[in-house]
Image: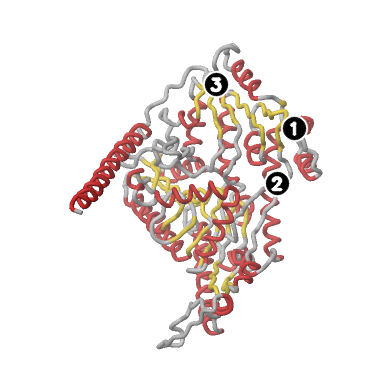
Amino acid sequence: MKQFFKFVLASVLGVIISSIILFFLFFILLSGLILSAGSDKAVDVDANSVLHIKLDYPISERTPNNPLANLSFLGFDGEKAIGLNDILACIKKAKKDANIKGIFLDESYMMSGQATTEEIRNALIDFKKSKKFVIAYSEIYTQGFYYLASVADKVYINPKGIFEFRGFSSEITFLKGALDKLGIQAQIIKVGTYKSAVEPLVLTKMSDANRLQVTSYLGSMYDHFLTGIGKSRNINKDSLFNYANSGRIQQPEDALKYKLVDGLKYKDEILSDLKKRTGLQEKNNMASVDLNDYVKSGTRADTDPKDVSYKNRIAIVYASGEISGGNGDDNSIGSETISKALRKVRMDNNVKAVVLRVNSPGGSSLASDVIWREVMLTKKVKPIIVSMGDVAASGGYYIACAADSIIAEPNTITGSIGIFAVLPNMQKLFNDKLGITFDGVKTGKFADLGDVSRPLTPEERLILQNSVNRGYDDFTKAVAAGRGKTQAYINSIGQGRVWTGTQALQNGLVDRLGNINDAIQSAAKKAGVKEYKIVSYPEQKSFLNRFGEGLTAEVKAHFVKAELGDNYRYYEQIKGVTKMMRTPQMRMPYDVVIR
């Protein structure tokens, strides 16, 4: 028996020592990978090179601070992670780079919003002013990628490829039937005829008002889409509409017949063409640099805020994702994180002006108001210009409305000035489905207001409605003050209605159409500075800082996305519903998915 215990003790001790050794080996290996991947070692670009751009990943507002993003390690495939800021910076640099002879726009699915695509498209149009070429090729042209590719000098498709050109559609998933089966009633308190975020919870199809607004903004976006393609391809916009509406583009040959593409070619033929354009013989390897590598050749879009050598700065504060209280990250807006960033740039004498980059469908009304306050305070000290991304609606518009001016893309989704609250009544689920009942005592009539095990009383509903009404009144007052309009006018274009950037320019919700570079130039002009450096906020956390914080959530999201694929958006929508049932919301009616 004594020998047995010695053996067990030795085994346990061996496991502990082995675990410690393995942990340190793993940490050393991980540290080495981070150091090697994050060294940002300059990449040499050969003469007569082609910049290879392949945008087949979701494009965030700025490149994440993740040195392992492009590595494959322990079975994980590294995700491409070049953000919009660095994509635009690379194209801008390539325009003047003597070693870059042209751009090869390779198979890209454009898993991003339309305003993001617009920014990149405009950057390519500007690149062409250098007289360098842009060649586009794909086996499958989605409508989003074709809109981008249509600016190329030559557009090619695989002879057996797929060309999508059908028009836009917007789809909403309604959950009322599922809630009814579960015995859950969504109790809705809202202001705004068009504030349709709650419709999926209480209806089985779109309301007339919602159908009207979706038809309006979808038509505006489609008109801009056709106009852009028509101008680039020298095709009448009405002809393009008829091609799509009559289903004439069925095969690659049809796209060629109607001059939407310039040729049907295989990839090897494209590579041969690129060699000729760069002066290479067929037997030689083509000189090219991938976007992921080119960004390392001194092409970053901004300067490290800790670098004190620059006295004139324009700060870009990125507000991207849903709005909630507390801290956020690159893909979510935390009121504390954004407020802290705005305070920091406000108090920094080297920062002469601020660009608030908003790409958000909204979220918590309280968190939105916290950020709005910081925008107001910043405006009193230095110029602050808003640049709108794919969407800047509801709470996303609220945090923008106090700025000196607002710049949006024509196909930005904005407006949605309204507010709502949702409280579930789960009495039938508990009582009838699960056989669970509740009983208790309370010291006041409204002590259990918000109890989900029973329906609201008329008096409780009135209390909540008054709270939402007050929130809408505050919202419209803030917009009226920020935009120099009457509250009555803002109410007339508010009511939760969604607008495109083009429509918002017409009704006064934005000041001009343009991109983030236009916003930067506007901020510099208002601040009276000509020479300046760009700095970005909030400061991105290092990979090691994130390792013990949100990395677990990121890994979990990675696996869920991998498992669900295109259905991941339904998972996100259901998660969004649970968030809506906590606090009053300034939120977009739904996720806008345009096919």
Q: Which residue is mark 3?
A: 101
Residue 245 rendering spot, x and y as whole percentages: 79, 45
Above or below — where is 171 with respect to 137? below
Q: Is residue 65 above or below residue 265?
A: below
Circle nearer the N terminus (3, 1): 3
Of badges 2 and 3, nearer the viewer stands 3
Residue 492 visible here? no
**Image point (60%, 71%), residue name:** 182
Q: Position of residue 359 (x, y in %)?
A: 51, 51
Neighbourhood count class around disc 1 (C-alpha, 10 Å): few under 14, some 14–19, many 20 upward = many
Query: Which residue is identified by label 2?
Result: 223
Image vertical order of residue 511 relative to residue 579, above or below: above
Measure how far apart labels 2 and 3 are at the Cα level. 33 Å
Q: Which mark is residue 252?
A: 1
The crowding category of the residue bearing disc 3, from other C-alpha atoms within 10 Å (few below 14, some 14 to 19, many at least 20), is many
Q: Quick one: 226 or 267, which is closer to the camera?
A: 267
The alpha-carbon separation of the residues under discs 2 and 1 comes to 24 Å
CA gap between label 3 and label 1 equals 28 Å
Amino acid bearing label 3: Lys
Q: Quick check: 532 left or right of 575?
A: left
Q: Secondary structure at mark 2?
A: helix
